[in-house]
Each structure stands twice: as C-alpha cells, then as structure tokens.
Amino acid sequence: MPITTRWPDSRGLSFHEEQAVSHSKTDVKLAEGQDDKVRKRILYLAHRVPYPPNKGDKIRSFNILKYLSQRHELHLAALIDDAKDIAVLPELRSQVTSLIYSRIDQAGRRLLSSRAILRSQSITVVHFYSRGLQSKIDDLIESTNFDVILCSSSPIAEYLFRSRHWNARLKDIVKIMDLIDVDSYKWQQYAQISSMAKAWVYRYEARKLEQYEKKIYRAFDKLLLVSDREKHYFPQPDNQNKIRAVQNGVDLDYFSDSSQRVPGSGGPAVVFTGMMDYWPNIEGVRWFIEEVYPAIRKAVPEVHFFVVGGRPSKEVSHWQSLDGVTVTGFVPDVRTYLGKEDVCIVPLQIARGIQNKVLEAMSMSKAIVSTPQALEGINLTLGEHALSALDAREFAAAVVGLLRDRQMADQIGQAARQFVEQHYSWEGNLRQLEEIILGKCLDTTR
C-alpha cells in the first residue's frame, strides 16, 4: 500500500504508554539505477511519528522517510503524542522494515517537564524521553547491525546517550542528527517577547538546550539544519565541518495551481494556514487581526480573512465572532483555501528555518505577504517571488495593493511557482542527505 502525501488532522491524548513492534517490509525496492552495494541499514528515530504529515516537523520527517525507504532498509522508532495517529500506522508499517513506537501522555509529560527544572534538566529532552521506547530501541540495536542512525530533532539524541550500547555497538555506527532548527535560539526569541515569568522559563530552556546542542555536536558525525542561514544560530563554531544544510521541499504535484475560490468568501479573501494551537502562529495571527486587518478592512470593506488550521485554541476560536473573520478549524484539504485569486499572509513574529506554509502557497502560485523572519530560510527575491513587510502599516499596504491589483498578484504568484520548481523539490533537496549518508559510511570503512 503506497504512502500518500496528505492525511486528515487528528486530535487526541493517550493516557498510558505502550510499545509496538511491526516487521513489515522485508524487501527494499532499490531506486532506479541504484547499486545494491550502496544500500544501507538505517535506524530512523523521530520525536513524533512522521504520519500523518500535517505539521512542519512531521512533513519533513515524512518526506525523509519516504525518500530513504525507497533506497535503503529503513527501521523506524518514534513517539506518538496524538492517539489518533495510531489509526494510520498500517500505512506507515508497509514502508519500513520494522516499526517501534511509544505513546506518551501529554498531561503526564507536563508534570515531568516541571520536574525537569528542579533537576536542572532540559524541559524538551525530558518531555520526549520514554523508558519504554528506550528499551525497545536498545533491543533493536542489539539484534540488528545498523550502518546509520538518523535522529530527527535534538531531544531524540537522549535515546543514544542513555543507550546501554553507547560505549559499545554505537561507537561503530554512523550517527547523524537532523536538528532542523536551532531550538536554543528559538527559545531565546520566545523569552524576548514574553511576560517576566514565562521569559524566565524560556531563558532557562534556551541555556539548557544550548548545552545539549554542544553535546550533540561532540558526539555525532554530522548535524543537519534546514538552511544555511540557520547555521549562524548554532551555539558554537563549526570547526570540525560537521554541520550541513538540507533544505525542505514541497510536493509540487499536490500543491499545484488552483482556480478554486475560497468557499463562501463572496469577494476578496486573505488566508493564513497553520496549526492553531502553536504559539508562534497564534501570536502572529493575533498581531495581524489587531494591528493590520482593520486598515485592510477600511481600504477593502468586502475582504474576508480565513484562519485555516486544526486544533484552534480558545482564543483563536473566539476570533470567529469578529466581523470579516472565519476560523475554519481542521479542513480536509487546505488547497481549497489557497485559491489563485486570494492573498496568503504569513505574519509570524517568531519563525525558524523554512516555513512549509510559505513553500506550499508559492507552489500554488499564491501571492504572499510575510514578515521578514518567516522568509528568512528561503533564498527568494523580495518583490519578485513574495512581498515582505516590517510593520503593520507596510503589511496592510502590501495586502491591499495585491487585492486591488490582480495582475501584480498573478505575476508574483507565477514567479513563486517557478522558483519552488527550481529550488524546492523534495527529490532534489534530499539527494544531499543521501550523499551525506553514503559519504560518512564510506569514511568508516577506510
């Protein structure tokens, strides 16, 4: 059964922890032209099961899994923090040689996270650690001769650091960490715009993660980040040339040009897409509604703003009562809301790495207005592929300009599509990961 590229949103909490192992894919079909000698046995460790690919980190890990499973013998170990994800595991099992997962209780994790501060530990690392999953990973490492262990997100390194094989079998296995973003810097950003109490916690976590990222640098063979710019935020110089950028991509066939209008808009529409329980998304949309949208409504009274994304918080749901605003909650297909005749906004005040929502909108020939930080990891040309605005006045003026000038909006959207076709296909960008894996394996045999 083939993996598809989009799945319904899911919501649910588990109240116990369980482990499951599935040995499903006994044969790995080699990519066209691939030599059987370069096929590697890879253990992929993810802090969330990469299925369904309905949020940023899961989109990246899903596409990495899909790419590597077509070329190598891939084993997966992951956490599930949403019970509904279990329903789609049969699809995932068919793509890997073995699957290990543990369910974690979100409420219990919050209690553990508070204890982390008392023990001077990273809140993030404690949150994503499961003794049950550790035991299963260690058993798998003992029974399988892996060439490579690829970790997705910094807290997953703990499963290697605490492994009973750390000073034995793991010494001979190539270890690659996909940090994606520099999390310590993200928490520093959170601290800068938060209340005193929250800022203290965020600064604490930034310090702990900075120490942890340095530990990872010493212990792993290669570290991956989502963009070259992200390298500048890493807490130490890359003196050993360990850090490489492997960019995200976008499914160019799925996110293709669409002539659909936003349902029920009845006129010009502005759209934001993203999970609406994620703090940076909430903060960004709140700023847009309070500081930007009134000026847009004054200039274009018939405009409508759609907030499209699953898991809306109570505050987000309340915005539904505002004039000219619709909060959709989960929708089965965001492409319906990324119609060709509308403007996509990305008003994030905090953004790290590459925003998938930006690539998806560009892939659908959408004209985008964004804050500079949300475009930081994408090497586009401002004014040609997207518009950027520094403050509320500029943001409103840019959106109004696009709503009034459809020719300019279409021109930017078409240029955006051509840009992602050239630079942001998953196939093209993940070839770099393949080169890193094969290169490090070759180094260990010399």
Image (cartoon, rainbow, N blue to C red):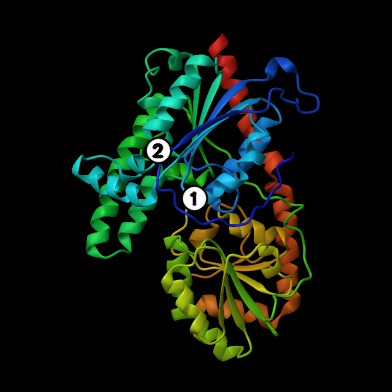
Give the quadrant of residue 287: bottom left
Q: Residue at x 69, y 66 (%)?
A: 366
Measured from the top left, where is residue 176 in percent x and y? 50, 28
Relative image position of residue 413 (x, y in whole percent): 72, 66
Closer to viewer: mark 2 or mark 1: 1
Callout 2: SS: helix
Gap in angstroms between the C-alphas marked 2 and 1: 18 Å
Residue at image coords 54%, 44%: 226
Residue 225, compared with residue 52, is above or below; it is above
Report the disc number at residue 155: 2
Please tell me whether mark 1 sits on a helix, a strand or a loop.
loop
**Is the C-beta separation of discs 2 and 1 under 8 Å?**
no
* Residue sitting at the far left: 118
Residue type at mark 2 is Pro
Mark found first going from the N terminus, 2 or 1: 1
On screen, residue 152 above or below 310 = above
| Residue at (36, 26) in percent of width and height | 161
Dot 2 alpha-carbon crowd within 10 angstroms: few under 14, some 14 to 19, many 20 or more:
many
Rendered image quadrant of residue 401: bottom right
In the figure, is residue 414 to the left or right of 44?
Answer: right
Name the spot of residue 136 as percent of width and height, x first: 46, 26
Q: Quadrant of the C terminus?
A: top right
Q: Does residue 96 appear in this view?
A: yes
Amino acid type of disc 1? Asp
Rendered location of residue 15, percent (x, y): 40, 48
Task: State which quarter of the image contains the N terminus.
Answer: top right
Compared to residue 352, the image places residue 318 above or below, namely below
Q: Which mark is residue 82?
A: 1
Q: What residue is at 76 percent from the left and 23 percent from the top? A: 34
The 10 Å Cα crowd at callout 1, few under 14, some 14 to 19, many 20 or more, is: some
